[in-house]
Image: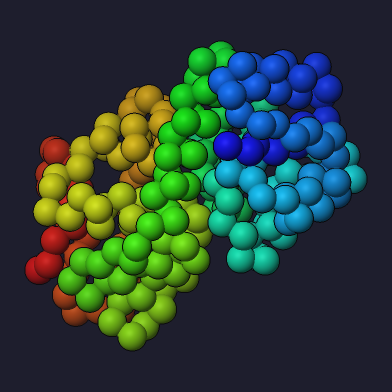
């Protein structure tokens, strides 16, 4: 598995590189946003670890330009900020996960493993539920003949719900499988993204698919 690290703090980048290489990953380093974007678009990587604050081009700009090209490589964003609004901003820009500095390396390892597993899932066959159709390769979604435009995080959340259609998913389930964050940390953000999905997936359609199970969580079902 090949990982690109875009991090301008060379000691931090070197520390992460050594640890991941000990886990048998092949690691490439970049120290600024311009070079990082060039390597990300020209290389065949399984994951990108991207710092928010970079010289020449900031991390969220790199992420936005990468996603604008149709590139769906999983991206783990590193940042010194941990407020809900900052996390949502990063996820809306196309990040798949978010890790605030300072962090324990074991937590980074767990996030890396989860994102690479998810990336492998996304190379699989088309998945369907009711009149929903998801293309895991291109991260495209249709309801009937209508294409629904989702951010990377909205897509990941919907794909998890489709793969578990008919099951009640607690906020803890969703936090563990879509963000790898402790439930207590991500409660509000989960509700924010469920509301985003409701507006896009159910808003213009008579049959609602995303339902709240009071006191338990959410379920994807018809009617």
- Please say if 164 is above or below 102: below
- In the displayed structure, does residue 10 sit left or right of residue 162? right
* Residue in view at x 69 percent, y 57 percent: 66
* Quadrant that contains the N terminus: top right
* Residue in view at x 33 percent, y 55 percent: 159
Please provide percent x and percent y for residue 76. Answer: 58, 38
- In the displayed structure, does residue 107 sit left or right of residue 142? right
* Residue in view at x 76 percent, y 55 percent: 42
Q: Nearer the viewer, residue 73 or 141?
A: 73
- Please say if 159 is above or below 19: below
- In the displayed structure, does residue 43 sit left or right of residue 189? right
Please provide percent x and percent y for residue 25. Answer: 61, 29
* Quadrant that contains the C terminus: bottom left
Quick one: which residue is furthest to the right in this view?
Answer: 56
Report the colour scheme: rainbow
* Residue in view at x 26 percent, y 35 percent: 173
Quick one: which residue is furthest to the bottom in this view?
Answer: 145
Q: Is residue 199 visible in this depiction of the protein?
A: no
* Count of numbered tags: 0
Please provide percent x and percent y for residue 118. Answer: 42, 44
Q: Nearer the viewer, residue 215 or 10?
A: 10
- In the displayed structure, does residue 209 sit left or right of residue 71? left
- Please say if 172 is above or below 166: above
Q: Nearer the viewer, residue 142 or 175?
A: 142
């Amino acid at each position: 598995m090949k990982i690109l690290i875009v991090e301008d703090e060379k000691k931090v980048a070197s520390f992460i590189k050594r640890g991941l290489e000990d886990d048998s990953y092949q690691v490439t380093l970049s120290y600024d946003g311009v070079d990082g974007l060039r390597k990300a678009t020209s290389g065949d990587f399984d994951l990108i670890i991207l710092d928010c604050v970079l010289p020449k081009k900031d991390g969220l700009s790199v992420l936005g330009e990468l996603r604008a090209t149709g590139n769906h490589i999983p991206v783990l964003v590193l940042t010194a900020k941990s407020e809900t609004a900052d996390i949502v901003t990063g996820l809306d820009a196309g990040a798949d996960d978010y890790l605030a500095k300072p962090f324990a390396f074991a937590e980074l390892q767990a996030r890396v493993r989860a994102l690479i597993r998810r990336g492998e899932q996304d190379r699989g066959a088309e998945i369907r539920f009711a009149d929903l159709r998801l293309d895991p390769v291109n991260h495209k979604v249709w309801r009937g003949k209508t294409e629904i435009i989702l951010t990377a995080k909205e897509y990941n959340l919907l794909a998890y719900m489709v793969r578990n259609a008919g099951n009640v998913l607690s906020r803890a389930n969703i936090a563990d499988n879509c963000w790898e964050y402790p439930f207590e940390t991500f409660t509000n953000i989960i509700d924010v993204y469920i509301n985003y999905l409701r507006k896009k997936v159910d808003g213009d359609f008579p049959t609602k698919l995303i339902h709240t199970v009071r006191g338990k969580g959410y379920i994807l079902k018809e009617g």
